[in-house]
Image (cartoon, helix red, strand yellow):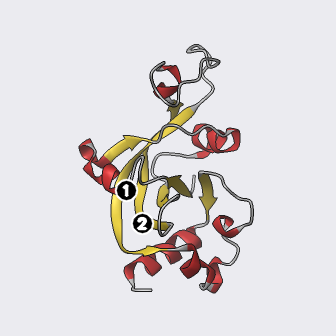
């Protein structure tokens, strides 16, 4: 099966790319996703070896800041069962969990964050889902060409 590519959004005040880099083994479960379409991507479509762009949302500036790789496929998000956790879901039974996560490992911090403005100025990224009005999904597929173009932009000053 061909490798796929994804964009994962995170609020850096909650969990930043630097936090991922500082995690044991540079790995972390991508928990807290509470949208059904995003959950379906995590549960059903993201596979070990897939490439990931990490996007800082609710930040100044918002930008793709690094790359990662899926190292463990979809499995139940444990935070849904932790009563004291912000992501607790009392309606999600342990024998039929509602929410899923993947585990990702940080690969590379981009020397130059890639902002939406830079993406908009790049013709081959004009159709990127991130730019679509109303697309707020925290987990989004990207094409291989989009992934490579973003990484290339992140290697050069903008």
Count residues near mark 1 (Cα–Cα under 10 Å), then give few for <14, some for 14-19, many for 20+: many
Residue that carries the numbered disc 2 in the rendered image: 65
- Residue 53 position (above or below residue 149): above
Q: Residue 48: horizontal and vertical position, in percent?
A: 47, 46
Q: Sequence-wise, which precedes: disc 1 or disc 2?
A: 1
Q: Please state the horizontal and vertical placement of residue 12, each as a whole percent of the image.
A: 42, 54
Q: Within 10 angstroms of label 2, few (less than 14), some, or many (20 or more) residues?
A: many
Depicted 52 relative to depicted 91: above or below = below
Q: Quadrant of residue 4?
A: bottom right
Q: Is residue 24 above or below residue 64?
A: above
Residue 24 image position (x, y, % from top left):
25, 42
Label 1: state its secondary structure: helix
- Give the number of the disc on residue 124: none
Q: Nearer the viewer, residue 37 or 83?
A: 83
Is residue 157 visible from the viewing direction of this image?
A: yes
Front residue (pair 118, 25): 118
Residue at image coords 61%, 66%: 143
85 lies above or below 54:
above
Badge 1 is on which residue?
17
Residue furthest to the right in view is 133
Relative placement, left or right, of 38 versus 112 is: right
Question: Where the C terminus falls, by quadrant?
Answer: bottom left
Count of marks overlaid on the render: 2
SS class, disc 2: strand
Is mark 1 in CB contact (under 8 Å) with mark 2?
A: yes
Residue 3 can be seen, yes or no:
no
Point 26% across, 50% down: residue: 22
Residue at image point 46% right, 80% down:
153
x, y percent for residue 139: 59, 51
Q: CA distance from mark 1 to mark 2?
A: 7 Å
- 106 on left or right of 90: left
């Amino acid at each position: 099966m061909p490798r796929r590519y994804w964009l994962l959004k995170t609020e850096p005040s909650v969990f930043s790319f630097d936090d991922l880099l500082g995690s044991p083994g540079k790995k972390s479960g991508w928990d807290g996703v509470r949208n059904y379409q995003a959950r379906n991507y995590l549960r059903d479509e993201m596979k070990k070896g897939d490439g990931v762009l990490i996007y800082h949302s609710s930040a100044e500036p918002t930008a793709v800041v690094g790359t990662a790789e899926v190292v463990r496929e979809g499995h139940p998000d444990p935070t849904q069962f932790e009563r004291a956790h912000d992501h607790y879901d009392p309606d999600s039974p342990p024998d039929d969990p509602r929410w899923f996560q993947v585990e990702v490992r940080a690969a590379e911090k981009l020397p130059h964050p890639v902002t939406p403005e830079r993406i908009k100025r790049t013709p081959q990224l004009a159709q990127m889902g991130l730019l679509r009005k109303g697309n707020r999904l925290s987990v989004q597929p990207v094409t291989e060409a989009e992934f490579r173009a973003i990484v290339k932009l992140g290697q050069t000053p903008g």
